[in-house]
Image (spheres, rainbow, N blue to C red):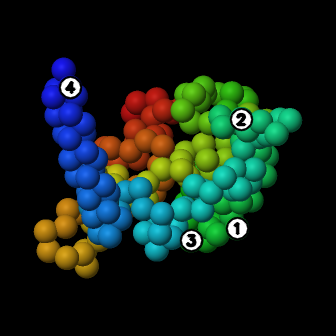
Amino acid sequence: MTGRKVGWEMAGRKTEKRLLALLLLLLLFPVSPASGEGSEDPGQNPHAHFKKSGSCRHCHVTIKSVLEPDRFLLEADAFCLGCHSFEEQGITHPRNVRPGDQAYPMAVPKDLRLNSQGKMICLTCHYAHGPFLSPTRAFPAQKAANTGAPAGTKPAYRTYFARRSDPVRGFVLLCEGCHGKR
């Protein structure tokens, strides 16, 4: 029994040494995502600041210091518009409208969130916490965003932080969430 115990201890030490060596290698040579997805570098993901816990209160409702991740503040659009302007966006969906009103008689799916007054905001259609780049196109004619990447790098496409998109049908999938299939 003693010999068996010594054998296991020696095998355990060898495994520990291998794991330690692997950990040191990973620390010396970090592996970066091939497509840029998940990157925290603002050059790779302009929304990387949303990963910082201090940013939550800019958009999300907080009650008694408890964050409600599915509810947005009335001012959440102001945070978006601190960087984005209406001019650069071109034609966009109306904001600050309440779906279900007589002028907008439709239901909004749960994954397309409204602000605390039930009105549409930027974050209704866009998911700020999502990846900036994806290996999947957001729409059919989309060109890769990483065209200057080294040879052998997989193409990466901007997501536009859209809550829904499809490489064949594009953003129509997002629009159909509220407006129905056309």
Q: In whole angstroms, how far apart are the C-alphas of marks 4 and 2?
A: 57 Å
Which residue appears at 62% of the width and 67% of the height?
A: 84
Amino acid type, label 2: Glu
Count neighbours of disc 4 (C-alpha within 10 A) and say few if under 14, some if 14 to 19, many if 20 or more: few
On the rendered structure, is 143 left or right of 110? left
On residue 88, the disc is 3
Residue 89 found in image quarter: bottom right
Q: In whole angstroms, how far apart are the C-alphas of marks 4 and 3?
A: 74 Å
Amino acid type, label 3: Glu
Q: Are marks 4 and 2 in contact (CB under 8 Å)?
A: no
Amino acid type, label 1: Gly
Amino acid type, label 4: Thr
Mark 1 vs mark 2: in front: 2
Element on which disc 4 rests: helix
Sequence-wise, the earlier of marks 1 and 3 is 1
Residue at numbered disc 4: 2
Location of residue 154 in the rendering, given as x and y in whole percent from the top left corner = 20, 62
Location of residue 121 in the rendering, given as x and y in whole percent from the top left corner = 67, 47
Residue at numbered disc 1: 82
Q: In whole angstroms, how far apart are the C-alphas of marks 2 and 3?
A: 31 Å
Count neighbours of disc 2 (C-alpha within 10 A) and say few if under 14, some if 14 to 19, many if 20 or more: few
Sequence-wise, the earlier of marks 4 and 2 is 4
